Image (cartoon, rainbow, N blue to C red):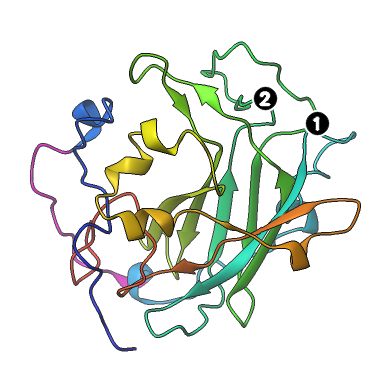
Amino acid sequence: MTYRPAADGTHPPLLSPGYRSTGLRAPSQAPVVLPQRLTEVTGPALTGPVGPSDADLTTQHAGEPIGQRIVVFGRVLDSDGRAVPDSLVEIWQANAAGRYAHARDDWPAPLDPNFTGGGRVITGSDGSYRFTTIKPGAYPWGNHHNAWRPAHIHLSLFGRAFTQRLVTQMYFPDDPLFAQDPIFNSVPDEKARLRMVSTFDLDATRPDWALAYRFDIVLRGGDQTPFEAPHDEEGHA
């Protein structure tokens, strides 16, 4: 693999003043680099059983969830455009009303008993992944006056060990809330921000059943997908 560092402005800073809670969450001291041990340098360790319902969030309960069915799919790629197989991709999201199935979510939108909002899948030999889910709703949050988060899906990618984890978010095209979302705009470079926006794919829709959105994830290089924390050349956060 040819290593090409991401361009400046690809990743959001750990402390982003517009995103108020980073004031408490951002580290105040330099990271401590721990030596790698056997579990960090051997693998793969994450190819355990993943059931069909793990990737289809619409079949995890007794009834149909409420909302627009969508297919979210894409490939996980390295900096040379080569497939990354056997990567564990996990997602979590709000329901169609913009509420998470989480005890601390107090947004007074209805919970959906048939939708929990969590899924996972292992990438195939061509780096592909696919989820069937419900398009999440926007929701208000307390970051600033009249603050609403755009519809989005959280993604976590694991490599060959739990120490190799990247977290990002996928947005939907043409969302009117992009301009006032400090999390989306914490990525300084506009081109990098747009790499977090999925593409509507008519050919991948399931007729009379579900819309489809493509979201390819590039782990390194000039076309790298923005992740939650910047990484240096050794992959340290």
| Count of numbered circles on the image | 2
50 left or right of 9 in image: right
The residue drawn where x is 48% and y is 60% is 157
Q: How many angstroms separate mark 1 from mark 2 (CA)?
A: 9 Å
**Residue type beneath disc 1:** Ile
Query: Residue at horizontal 39%, vertical 69%?
Result: 219
Q: Which residue is mark 1?
A: 66
Q: Are marks 1 and 2 in contact (CB under 8 Å)?
A: yes
Q: Which residues fall within the magenta stretch?
A: 27-38
Residue 234 on image: x %, y %:
20, 71
Q: Could you tell me what secondary structure mostly forms the magenta stretch?
A: loop
Q: Quadrant of residue 127?
A: bottom right
Pinpoint residue 195: horizontal percent, then vertical percent.
43, 60
* Quadrant of the image occupied by residue 57: top right
Which of the 4 quarters of the picture holds residue 46? bottom right
Which of 175/83 is in front? 175
Q: Is residue 12 above or below residue 117?
A: below
Q: Which mark is residue 97?
A: 2
Residue neighbourhood size for the residue with mark 1, other residues' Cα within 10 Å, grouped as few (<14), some (14–19), many (≥20):
some
Task: Name the image quarter holding the N terminus.
Answer: bottom left
